[in-house]
Amino acid sequence: MLPKILKLKGVQPISRAQQKTISGGGPFPPADDCGCIVMGSQGYLEIIAVSCSSTCPDGTQPIGGLGF
């Protein structure tokens, strides 16, 4: 993969000291932690993660804390 990156137009190498000064971006956005309890394909109840602002497949509101 590195050879492909180095072949990109305008790529310039940086020193090890410059590499050490690079830091990542901000934190990951918070995870959506809502879920719905649905009947799975094999007849068992399952929990599916959904957006807290959406609705469950059966039309009910998602339950907070069930997402993953």
Image (tube, helix red, strand yellow):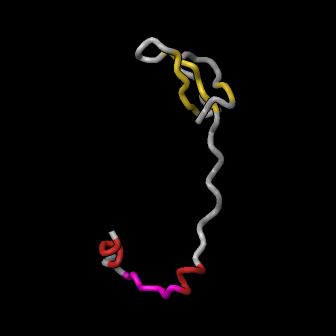
Name the quadrant containing residue 27: bottom right
**Residue at the (55%, 85%) spot, across then down:** 18
Query: On screen, 7 above or below 17?
Result: above
Expressed as whole percent of the image width and height from the top left, the position of residue 65 reads 68, 31
Q: How many marks?
A: 0
Left or right, 65 with respect to 4, comes to right
Expressed as whole percent of the image width and height from the top left, the position of residue 49 reads 56, 31
**Residue at the (63%, 25%) spot, across then down:** 62
Find out whether residue 12 is within the magenta segment.
yes
In this rendered view, identify the residue nearer to me: 37 or 59: 37
Expressed as whole percent of the image width and height from the top left, the position of residue 48 reads 53, 27
Query: Which quadrant is home to the N terminus?
Result: bottom left
Query: On screen, 31 above or below 40?
Result: below
**Residue at the (35%, 73%) spot, across then down:** 2
Expressed as whole percent of the image width and height from the top left, the position of residue 68 reads 58, 36
Name the quadrant containing residue 47: top right
Span colored in magenta: 10-16
Q: Main secondary structure of the magenta part?
A: loop
Left or right, 52 with respect to 3, comes to right
**Residue at the (57%, 22%) spot, across then down:** 56
